[in-house]
Image: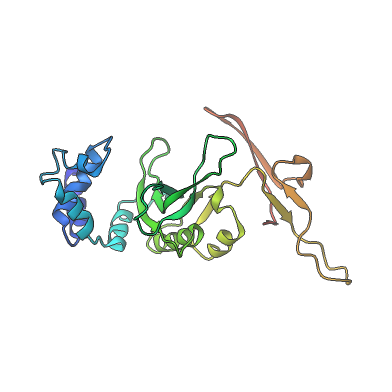
Amino acid sequence: MKADKLKAFRQAAYEHLTKAKDATFELTDAILFTRHAQCLADLSLSPVFRRSWPSVYEALQDCRPQRNKLMRLYIEQMPTDVRPILAGDHTVWPREDAQTLQERTVEHQATAVNGNRPITIGQGYSTIAWIPEDSGSWAIPLRHERITSWENPINKAVWQLKQVCKYLPTRPISLWDSEYGCAPFILKTANIPADKLIRLRSNLCLWTAPPSYCGKGRPRLHGNKFKLNDSTTWTPAIESVEVAHPQLGQLRISLWQDLHF
């Protein structure tokens, strides 16, 4: 039964590759079987890639996969009795020495050297993946696309989340890194049917709701500061729950409302 389902899935994915789909499909299998490929030519040495090494480049150049149809095919594999967990991220492919590569942009990249700017030159990619398991490293990318020089990571992630949620059978829970913990992302995803769990920077400052207008001067836009790294500025939590985690130990989860960027 599982073998028949796998064959049907592979056949459907094969049909959505359009041009050069034979070489592209074998290249996909080669990527799955090759754990440490130093270059594209290494993939041509895989036993599942039954073509000569120039076919690797020809497949990448000629293939035009139907991304929306592939995304819908992946979504069809999701169980419908549980809420799906999605994870969004922005990653960079450093290409400092590729001076002839088009669409290189300045990207953020962490550095271990104190004093160095955490940047690099390369290409950024935005990914939304389905996390099917509670533990492990398996993830199924639903959309993985390059962020062009006229786009930004926030707008790209918003567009991808909207495209994915359009075909999901149930409302998902989406996980995001601190890059997306900002007002533009919250506002632009407000009407997308997805719940968001976002990591915030430890030095981020939020604001409480402004007080009522006193009748003089300009109405206040913000209330009091709520500094995440200064507990003396925190207002009393509406609700707190403590749980014992088998790996992290004792955890406290607190709830605040009416905070904004």
Residue 198, image x, y percentages: 56, 49
Kindly identify the residue that appears in the image at 74 percent across and 49 percent down.
226
Q: In the displayed structure, does residue 159 sit left or right of residue 29?
A: right
Label count reads 0
Q: Residue at x 81, y 69 (%)?
A: 219
Asked whether residue 86 appears in the rendered view, the answer is: no
Kindly indicate the quadrant of the structure image that contains residue 160. bottom left
Q: Quadrant of residue 50?
A: top left
Say whether residue 219 is visible: yes
Q: How is the image coloured?
A: rainbow
* x then y, percent, for residue 5: 20, 48
Measured as percent of width and height from the top left, residue 25 is found at 18, 51
**Depth check, front residue: 159 or 135:** 159
> Which one is in front, 235 or 199?
199
Question: Looking at this view, is 217 or 61 the one in front?
Answer: 61
Q: Quadrant of the C terminus?
A: bottom right
Looking at the image, residue 112 lies above or below residue 191: above
Q: Residue at point 45% right, 56% down? A: 105
- Asked whether, in this view, residue 103 is left or right of residue 112, the answer is left
Residue 96: x and y in percent read: 41, 47
The N terminus - image quarter: top left
